[in-house]
């Protein structure tokens, strides 16, 4: 039985958003085929992890101190090992024979060398092309632009300095593989897409007359995507026929901010950060993904596919997901509106029902825990030390 040390800066609990779902799914995959997982979890929100149990997974909390560093200089921490975290890693490697280290997502490549010096194979997980995503940001103001480019350049260097030192680098899509091929040996790159534990997704209740957009609305791509949709797509024609619900972290605050600038915005509501998003998605007529920026793939689309809710998305929003035309792709505001109107009109219900059933079967076939745990197990078996 393998002992895996798993390190991530993001807690999978509560399993609200895409970042959390990615980590939950990965931990579940590692545990279901019999690995003992010693999971060091970043817990900056100080979530009580005691109620959350996973078979064969032991959790060890770690929280970076926020400090009072300048907004620019705080990004340099991605090149330095944290002493307290290193102490915890040393304690675990001394107490257990660690067979594989799995460093999952973001900029923690500086810890690879510790394991490599001890002949412990390293898997490095990614969830998008992070420096590319940072570069897409459309910040305004001199200071914001300086901060953005400083962040981008440091991330760019970190990726090229550390990622290729791992024995395997997991990416979530073909596009992300092409990006990482610029600085990681191709034989180390493996596509493990975002995936779901389908036992957590059961379609429930009838479809109601509303549209939903989910996500973490502190992420700039969701902010800009929602703003674009409300300014260019949502109008009186739509607001008279249906309502829009946005749900997820920071959704209340963002909607209040938007409404202060657009006082005539009608029939748009925020649900906030809800404990279980699945009923909201399952009972919606449409899940929208109006993103203009992004990389990786959107778990919010996979959730809608698993819950048999029709998805209307921009090309960028659907990037990284092989949907075989089971979701509707539109990039112009007028087309986005017209597709919504067609669905709300209800004249082609059988056509849309066929689409959602196809999407569901595709999600089962390509983006389920059962399918992807086999791929992960194969990687682990090839990394015996």
Image (spheres, rainbow, N blue to C red):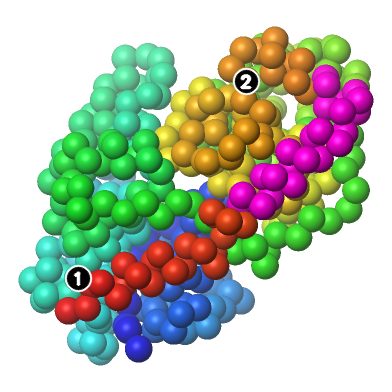
Taking 33 as reference, is 196 left or right? right
The C terminus appears in which quarter of the rendering?
Answer: bottom left
Taking 316 as reference, is 300 left or right? right
- Whether the residues at callouts 2 and 1 have beta carbons within 8 Å, the answer is no
Disc sitting over residue 138 in the figure: none
* Residue 210 figure quarter: top right
Residue at left offset 66%, top offset 12%: 333
Residue at left offset 64%, top offset 63%: 198
Q: Nearer the viewer, residue 241 or 380?
A: 380
Around disc 1, counting alpha carbons within 10 Å, would you say few (fewer than 14), some (14 to 19), or many (20 or more)?
many
Residue 95 appears anywhere in the view: yes
What residue does disc 2 label?
Answer: 330
Which region of the structure is painted magenta? 341-363
Q: Position of residue 44 (x, y in %)?
A: 44, 58
Residue at left offset 41%, top offset 55%: 192
What residue does disc 1 label?
Answer: 121
Q: Earlier in the sequence, mark 2 or mark 1?
A: 1
Q: Position of residue 120 (x, y in %)?
A: 17, 74
Residue at left offset 43%, top offset 73%: 30
Tell me the element at label 1. Answer: loop
Around disc 2, counting alpha carbons within 10 Å, would you say few (fewer than 14), some (14 to 19), or many (20 or more)?
some
The N terminus appears in which quarter of the rendering?
Answer: bottom left
Is most of the magenta stretch helix, strand or loop?
helix
Q: Indicate whether 72 appears above or below 231.
A: below
């Amino acid at each position: 039985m393998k002992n895996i040390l798993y390190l991530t800066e993001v807690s999978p609990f509560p399993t609200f958003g895409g970042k959390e779902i990615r980590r939950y799914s990965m931990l579940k995959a590692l545990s279901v085929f019999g690995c003992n997982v010693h999971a060091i979890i970043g817990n900056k929100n100080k979530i009580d992890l005691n109620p959350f149990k996973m078979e064969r997974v032991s959790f060890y909390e770690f929280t970076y101190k926020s400090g009072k560093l300048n907004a620019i200089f705080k990004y340099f921490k991605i090149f330095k090992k944290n002493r307290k975290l290193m102490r915890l890693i040393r304690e675990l490697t001394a107490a257990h024979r660690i067979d594989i280290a799995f460093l999952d997502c973001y900029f923690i490549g500086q810890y690879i060398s510790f394991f490599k010096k001890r002949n412990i194979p390293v898997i490095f997980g990614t969830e998008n092309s992070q420096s590319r995503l940072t570069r897409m940001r459309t910040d305004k103001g001199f200071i914001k632009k300086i901060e953005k480019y400083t962040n981008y350049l440091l991330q760019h260097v970190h990726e090229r300095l550390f990622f290729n030192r791992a024995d395997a680098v997991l990416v979530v899509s073909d596009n992300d593989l092409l990006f990482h091929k610029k600085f990681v040996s191709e034989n180390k790159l493996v596509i493990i897409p975002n995936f779901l534990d389908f036992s957590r997704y059961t379609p429930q209740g009838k479809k109601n007359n509303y549209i939903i957009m989910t996500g973490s609305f502190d992420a700039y791509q969701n902010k800009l995507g929602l703003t674009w949709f409300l300014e260019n797509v949502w109008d009186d024609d739509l607001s008279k026929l249906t309502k829009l619900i946005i749900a997820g972290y920071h959704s209340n605050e963002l909607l209040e901010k938007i409404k202060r600038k657009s006082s005539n915005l009608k029939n748009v509501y925020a649900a906030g950060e809800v404990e279980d998003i699945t009923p909201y998605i399952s009972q919606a007529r449409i899940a929208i993904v109006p993103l203009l920026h992004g990389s990786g793939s959107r778990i919010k689309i996979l959730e809608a596919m698993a819950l048999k809710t029709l998805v209307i998305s921009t090309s960028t929003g659907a990037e990284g997901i092989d949907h075989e035309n089971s979701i509707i792709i539109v990039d112009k505001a007028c087309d986005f509106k017209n597709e919504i109107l067609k669905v709300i009109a209800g004249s082609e219900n059988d056509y849309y029902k066929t689409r959602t059933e196809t999407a569901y079967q595709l999600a089962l076939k390509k983006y389920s825990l059962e399918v992807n745990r086999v791929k992960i197990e194969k990687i682990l078996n090839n990394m015996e030390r």
